[in-house]
Image (cartoon, rainbow, N blue to C red):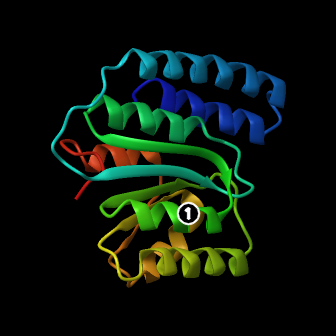
Amino acid sequence: VHTYIPLLGHMGWLWQTDSIKPAHEHFISNLIYQKIAFNIAALPKAETNNDHVNILFLPYGEIHDLGLMFLNYTLKLKGEKVIYLGKSIPFDNLFYLNSQVKNCTWITYFMLDRPIEEKIEFLNSVEKLLAHTKNNCVIVGKVWEDFSKENTNSQIIFKSGLEQLISTKKEAVVSE
């Protein structure tokens, strides 16, 4: 957390200011991704009586999955059950999984900003996904700050970044 997340944040700023090229960012990101994947593979299988599952996904069109991969590792390291769906998942694909997993936290991450209409449509879809369940959804990304202030749905939780998400849940990272 204390090394990779600040490094990625700094790289994002360098990329946005044209100080580095996308190839530089991709090179470093892929090295980190490989390191995280190796460490996930080395973890023992979580043995818990808790039936709660964290389901991680990036919405359709979002391809920056390194932060989500890091969260996957962090949750598994803490013994949490995780289903990692990955990047660019069409939202309608989530409904089937939601019918099969009765106790879950959906976690999604946005790097790219979207037009307000798309954000509203996404939130409407999340509300439909969560309707008549005890499940919740954590939406991570600074691009949602305006929506987080107006949120009245207790099943939808907004976090500005992964560091905030991880640090607010020391014992059980996201499970309630």
Question: Is residue 158 something that shows in the picture?
Answer: no
Quarter of the figure that contains the N terminus: top left
- Which residue corresponds to the image point at 82% horizontal and 31% vertical from the top-left? 22
Residue 69 or residue 3, whichever sits in front: 69
The image position of residue 15, as x and y in percent, is: 76, 35
Q: Position of residue 17 (x, y in %)?
A: 78, 39
Please give left or right for residue 59 compared with residue 158 in the image: right
Nearest the camera: 94 or 141?
A: 94
Kindly indicate the quadrant of the structure image that contains residue 110: bottom right
Answer above or below: position of 9 versus 133.
above
- Location of residue 10 in the rendering, given as x and y in whole percent from the top left corner: 61, 32
Q: Is residue 66 above or below residue 172?
A: above
Name the residue at 75% across, 55% down: 61
Residue carrying label 1: 94
Query: In the rendered image, which quarter contains the C terminus?
Result: bottom left
Amino acid type of the residue tagged 1 in the rendering: Leu
**Residue at horizontal 15%, vertical 43%?**
49
State the image coordinates of residue 167 (x, y, percent, origin top left). 30, 44
